Image (cartoon, rainbow, N blue to C red):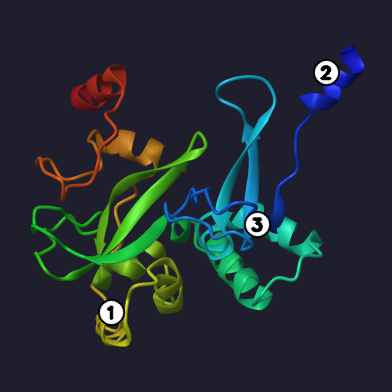
C-alpha cells in the first residue's frame, strides 16, 4: 500500500501530447486548446493536495512564457511537432532575455490611464502597447504594460514581432506593420528594475496608482519592507 501510494504521488514529468477533449484552456493566453492539438503540460506541485498537478499551454505559449521548462521536454519528445525550430529558438531567446517571458500579448490601449512599466509615462489611449504578466505559484498574473517603443529598454530585445503575432493571433498584417514601425523607434534609457526584490528596494508597487480596468494590477509590498524603505 505504501509503495503504491509513493508511486501515485511521485513527481510527474512535463509532457507534450495531444489535447483529448478541447475543454482545457491554455494557462498562458487563456484561449481553449483544440482537441487533437499538441499541447505542453507542465507538472507542478498541487496547491490543493498531495502530488503534482498538470497545467496545459499551447506550444507557442509555452515557448514564449515557460522557455526553461519547454526546452528539455521539446528535446526529448518524439511527438510530431510542427515548427520545432521556431519553438526552440523562441525558448532560447526567452532564456537569454530574462524579462522576455513576461510578454503576454499586444493590444490597443483603452483609456490612457495605464503607465508604462519601463519609462513610467502614461500610455495614450488607442495606441499599441505590450501587456505583461508574471508567472508565480503556478499561475500567470498581469503586472502592467509597456510602450512598444520601450521594448528594448525593458525586455532587452526588439526581435519580438513574430512572437507578438503568435501570442496575439487576431493581429492582422496592417496592425503588424504598425507595431513593426514602433519597434524601430525605441526610447532611450534603461528600464527600472522591477523584480520582486527590486520593487521592494524602490519602496513602491509596480503599477499605475489609479483605478479602473485599464490599469495594471498591483501586488502590495509587505508592511515591514515599505516601512524600512520610508525610513532609509
**How far across and how far down the image is residue 131, in percent?**
30, 58
Is tag 1's residue or tag 2's residue first in the polypeptide sequence?
A: 2
Residue picked out by circle 1 = 179
Distance Cα–Cα, label 1 vs label 2: 53 Å
Callouts 1 and 2 close, C-beta under 8 Å: no
Which one is in front, 11 or 181?
11
Q: Which residue is at a point 28% across and 79% down the rendered structure image?
A: 179
Which one is in front, 111 or 91?
111
Is tag 3's residue or tag 1's residue first in the polypeptide sequence?
A: 3
**How far across and how far down the image is residue 226, in percent?**
25, 24
| Rendered position, 198 above or below 84 | above
Q: Quadrant of the C terminus?
A: top left
**How far across and how far down the image is residue 8, in percent?**
80, 25
Q: Is residue 8 left or right of residue 35?
A: right
Residue picked out by circle 2 = 5
Q: Residue furthest front?
A: 21
Residue picked out by circle 3 = 70
Q: Is residue 73 left or right of residue 26?
A: right
Is tag 3's residue or tag 2's residue first in the polypeptide sequence?
A: 2
Amino acid at each position: 500500500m505504501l509503495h503504491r501510494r509513493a508511486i501515485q504521488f511521485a513527481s510527474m514529468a512535463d509532457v507534450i501530447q495531444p489535447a483529448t477533449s478541447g475543454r482545457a484552456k491554455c494557462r498562458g493566453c487563456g484561449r481553449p486548446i483544440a482537441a487533437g492539438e499538441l499541447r505542453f503540460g507542465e507538472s507542478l506541485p498541487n496547491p490543493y493536495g498531495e502530488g503534482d498537478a498538470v497545467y496545459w499551454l499551447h506550444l507557442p505559449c509555452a515557448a514564449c512564457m515557460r522557455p526553461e521548462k519547454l526546452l528539455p521536454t521539446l528535446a526529448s519528445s518524439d511527438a510530431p511537432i510542427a515548427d520545432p525550430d521556431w519553438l526552440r529558438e523562441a525558448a532560447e531567446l526567452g532564456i537569454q532575455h530574462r524579462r522576455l517571458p513576461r510578454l503576454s500579448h499586444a493590444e490597443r490601449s483603452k483609456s490612457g490611464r495605464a503607465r508604462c512599466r519601463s519609462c513610467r509615462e502614461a500610455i495614450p489611449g488607442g495606441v499599441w502597447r505590450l501587456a505583461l504578466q508574471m508567472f508565480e505559484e503556478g499561475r500567470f498574473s498581469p503586472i502592467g504594460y509597456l510602450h512598444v517603443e520601450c521594448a528594448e529598454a525593458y525586455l532587452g530585445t526588439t526581435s519580438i514581432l513574430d512572437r507578438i503575432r503568435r501570442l496575439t493571433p487576431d493581429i492582422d498584417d496592417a496592425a503588424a506593420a504598425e507595431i513593426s514601425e514602433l519597434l524601430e523607434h525605441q526610447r532611450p534609457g534603461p528600464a527600472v528594475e522591477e523584480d520582486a526584490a527590486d520593487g521592494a528596494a524602490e519602496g513602491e508597487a509596480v503599477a499605475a496608482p489609479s483605478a479602473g480596468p485599464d490599469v495594471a494590477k498591483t501586488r502590495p509590498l509587505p508592511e515591514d519592507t515599505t516601512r524600512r524603505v520610508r525610513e532609509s
